[in-house]
Image (spheres, helix red, strand yellow):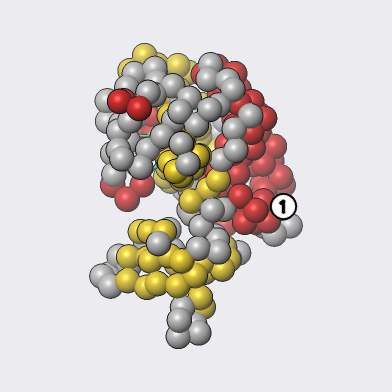
Amino acid sequence: MFTSLDVLDEVGSTNTELVERVRAGDAGAGAVLVAEEQTAGRGRLERSWTAPPRSGLFFSMALEPVAPVERWGWLPLLTGVATATALARAAGLDTSLKWPNDLLADVDGSERKIGGILAERAGERAVVVGIGLNVSLRADELPAPGAGSLALAGAQGTDRDPLLRAVLRSLEEWYGRWNGADGDPGASGVQEAYAAGCATLGRSVRAELPGGGDVTGEAVAVDGDGRLVLATSAGMQRPIGAGDIVHLR
Ligand code: BTN
């Protein structure tokens, strides 16, 4: 599945760079771009992603799924499942997923964000999925109050090369399963695996809606479109899309 691996000392954002390369025809499906340092790393919802040089894994991959485009919303979610699987295998670390695609781990009894995923279209047929993992950051290097790192969460291995290999291998498995099932999250087992690893389910949640206002309820499911379903106090089932900001209460 992965056809090339390019490592840069420094880049603005591996996602931005790889999207540009795909659009220019300079990279195709299976290309992986890794950077030692990002000077303009980006997160979801126009946020920035910052991390000291060489303190983590910052990489992006270009994919051209055969699965129908309506199901591509599952790509960042399955990437979360694959990354969590790899961290358990390669670093003996238990992680969970905050919907839609933050990776959480326990640091001194509190749930901290140790990684995030950003998926972006790169033309008609391709999508670029970027992963950022805080690997060796010390407490005084954390970019935000809710952040953590693999090292602080007690990971058994924090060498970046074996971790990258483990994540890519796991992605090959999960992406292969999903793409092979035509992107069907149920038939591929991705939906079930996601629900099993999702820390948001069963919790009380407040979602800020893009048009203003908010909705609160208990997170009860992740539906076939990858939306988080809230059961509201009015007895309604309300699906929440990935553009909404979700706060655990
Ligand atoms: C998020 O938590 O909102 C997503 C963070 C994604 C960060 C990764 S680091 C590699 C890739 N390049 C970027 O600019 N962003 C992603």
Looking at the rendered structure, the number of numbered marks drawn on it comes to: 1
Q: What is the x, y in percent for residue 136? A: 44, 21
Where does ligand 1 appear, by image quarter?
top left
Q: Where in the figure is residue 97, as x and y percent of width and height?
A: 53, 48
Q: Is residue 85 above or below residue 228?
A: above
Closest to the observer: 151 or 164? 151
Amino acid bearing label 1: Ser
| Quadrant in which the N terminus appears | top right
- At x 45% / y 85%, what residue is drawn? 234
Query: In which image quadrant can residue 167 be found?
Result: top right
Task: Quadrant for the C terminus, please.
Answer: bottom left
Question: Label 1, on which residue?
Answer: 188
Vertical position of residue 183 compared to residue 161: above or below: below
Q: Nearer the viewer, residue 136 or 59?
A: 136
Q: Which residue is drawn at 30% across and 33% down?
A: 143
Residue drawn 67% across the image and 30% down it: 89
**Drawn side of residue 192 relative to residue 31, left or right:** right
Q: Can residue 87 be seen in this view?
A: yes
Residue 74 vs residue 244, the one in the foreground: 244
Write the residue at 29% across / 44% down: 47
